[in-house]
Amino acid sequence: MKRKRTLHSWFASNSNAPLVVSEPNARPVDVVVQPASIENIIHPTPTNERTNPSTDVDESTNPHANESTNPPTNESTNQPPKHHILEFHPSQIFGDPADRIPIEDYAPEIRSEVRRAYLLKQRNKATGHKFEVGLDGKIWRSFQPQWLDKFDWLEYSVKKEAAFCFPCFLFKNPSQAARFGNDVFTVDGYKRWKTALGNFRKHVGGPSSYHNIAVGLCVDFSNQRANVATKMRVYNKEADIKYKIRLTASLDCARYLIAQGEAFRGHDESSNSVNKGNFREFLDWYKDKNKDVKDAFDKGQGNTLMICPDIQKDLATCCALEVTKVIKEELGDKNFSILIDEARDCSIKEQMAIILRFLDDHGELQERFLAIKHITDCTSAGIKEALVHVLEYHGLPINRLRG
């Protein structure tokens, strides 16, 4: 019968220095000590002690006894792995550099989408902001607006009253964070205006500097035709023309539905559906009326037909951005007031509709719809925070708000 080994007997058998007791008149015995392997060395802690001796088992037969339940850590930094943001939403795009979420916090598969959204929004020039003046020694100094025109990469944070670098924020290598001063123009912000011009030029550096590498990546990313992935594909001129026809036709249908305030999608958009929804049905009607459009869709590639739900959302978002851009150009640097009204969708979610009121160049009162913001906190503080976020997102300084 096999005898069960207790915890005490197990440690005694695996000890590096076993106790050998010699009996009197006994023949000396050569003892050979086998060192215990590292895998078998267990450091007991009070939380692992068993309180029921009857349940002692031979641990050599339990291969999962010593497995750790803690999450894996990064061996280089001895820190737990960082959880990335898996889904991108336009509300995460902030105009002020101090409020932005770092690009490396997003999942790798959506970082291009985030960079594209920031490039469309462009750098923050803090137009109309009165820059803070501080005493440096015996001289009062502040950020100079002409620096924004002199350095096309420079942007300003109203919240931190500091200068930042737009290309370095978009394409900074996270491994460079360990270098001294690398986060000045991306995280901390630069505030020493006395030596600003010299340090701005020092930040640019030579052709192989981190800043110029980021600028090159930014230019290549903006020019999608210069992308390596684009160069690897072989498209003839005819395919490019048909793609533009499909895109233009889908955009025309989207613009009409937006202008009429109609829904895009239906319950069933498959090819065998009787009613595919307003967008698909209108596009089919458009193809029947225009032979070139029908030919472009019939001979187009299956993955570039510009009709999927994601494309419909992108087209609607692009139209909204263009309309907002026209409204802001009409507003210019004038003062404005706002109208806020409660709005609910079909799922009974609280939303806030924001309307701008201002006088145009002819002195006539204009009212323009700006945005709808989902409200999670219906208190006065929550509504104020949501309003400030919308104004910052659209680049409207709150110091120009009246009423």
Image: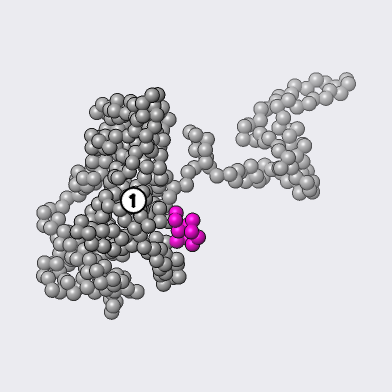
Residue 60 coordinates in the image, percent (x, y): 67, 42
Of 347 and 207, nearer the camera is: 347
Q: How did the renderer colour the structure?
A: one colour
Region rendered in magenta: 375-385
Q: Nearer the viewer, residue 385 or 130?
A: 130
Location of residue 50 by image quarter: top right
Q: Residue lying furthest right in this view?
A: 24
- The single residue placed furthest to the bottom in the displayed view is 274
Which residue does the image show at 15% across and 52% down from the upper left? 235
Above or below, 355 relative to 92: below
Does the image show residue 353? yes
Left or right: residue 256 versus residue 78 is left
- Residue 256 appears at what percent x and percent y? 22, 69
Q: Give percent across and percent down for residue 366.
A: 26, 62
**Is residue 215 visible from the viewing direction of this image?**
no
Residue 206 left/right relative to 89? left
User: Vertically, is 393 above or below 376?
Assistant: above
Residue under pointer 1: 400
Q: Residue at x 18, y 74 (%)?
A: 285
Vertical placement of residue 13 versus 87, above or below? above
Residue kind at label 1, given as amino acid type: Arg
| Residue drawn at point x = 77 percent, y = 41 percent | 6
Residue 222 location, quadrant: top left
Q: Give the residue at x 45% y 70%.
A: 348
Q: Nearer the viewer, residue 222 or 353?
A: 353
